[in-house]
Image (spheres, helix red, strand yellow):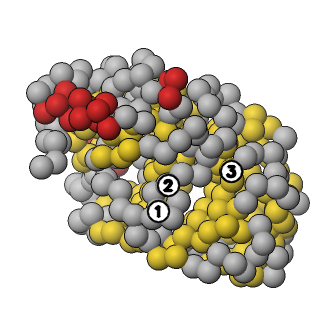
Amino acid sequence: MSWMPTDDPMLGDPKTCDALELIIVPRTRDLGDGFAVRRALPHGKRQMVGPFIFFDHFGPVQFIAGKGMDVRPHPHIGLATVTYLFDGRIMHRDSEGNIQEIAPGAMNLMTAGRGIAHSERTPDVERRDGQNMLGLQSWIALPKGAEEIAPSFQHFAAATLPTITDTGFTARVIAGSAFGAASPVTMVSPWFYAEVNARAGTTVPLDPDHEERAIYLVAGDIEIAGDRHTGPCLLIFRPGDRITVRVVTDTRMMFLGGDALEGPRHIWWNFVSSSKERIEQAKQDWKTGRFAAVPDESEFIPLPE
């Protein structure tokens, strides 16, 4: 989606648990029509967790009959987008000709690489009838050697992703490996992403297998090393020991992270790159119409002034 990152969410106390490096309480923004966004990344004190460079929590929002979301065609470079829904549906269309209705629990990975444009809209049936929407959108920064790869799109329905059921919790592995299972999603660098739903009284492990890791608490209350955390918040952990999460109330959370990239990234609007010059080129390419168009779409979002 086309939402300008902000870098100043509130910051909690990072010293309450030795393994806990940073607590980010995402800043809430209203994008209009009651559509609320909570942004956890990028943050002034932490740009990325693994390659995750942008993390938005949108909704819950109720669209009445006849209303919906219309994110007009807009461009991306140097990243991959992950749209993940808990409720509602979105119709994805991109300049590579991909058309895909995104449903709850499905994995949708659009790799922009050297450049792609896409739109995100409420599907016709849901626009006619109205719908609730709740979900997450993340950007995955690409490593230097893959920033200019060909654009692509992957879709995996919820039923095709591995689901682990343990005492008191279930986990869906959206990307990478977690809980002893691996997602079928193809990636250009090592990262992982999993949805975990857990009942009160349960304990859930966050393994030390990944260089950088975090938990995004969507809703509910958990305890780690005796300290209580209430969603929504992003908990970023230091490398090393296994973390045990004690679930205080019924909770939905996302486990995420991966290998750190080789350096920071520049971000401007919807563009991510290791090179400022590449972002300037992308600005001109969008402004002058050199990005491929999204088929059957006549609208677009102009380059911000």
Residue at figure coordinates x 23%, y 65% from the top left: 32
Name the quadrant containing residue 152.
top left
Which residue in the structure is indicated by mark 3? 212
Question: Label 3 sits on what residue type?
Answer: Glu
1 and 2 marks in contact (CB < 8 Å)? yes
x and y percent of residue 115 in the render? 33, 26
Which residue in the structure is indicated by mark 1? 43
Residue at figure coordinates x 45%, y 57% from the top left: 42
Q: Relative to 238, say whether 153 is above or below.
A: above
Mark sitting earlier along the chain (3/2): 2
The one nearer the camera, 195 or 65, is: 195
Name the quadrant containing residue 278.
top left
Secondary element type, mark 1: loop
Residue at figure coordinates x 65%, y 48% from the top left: 257
Image-based side of 33 in relation to 50, left or right: left
Secondary element type, mark 3: strand
x and y percent of residue 264 in the render? 49, 45
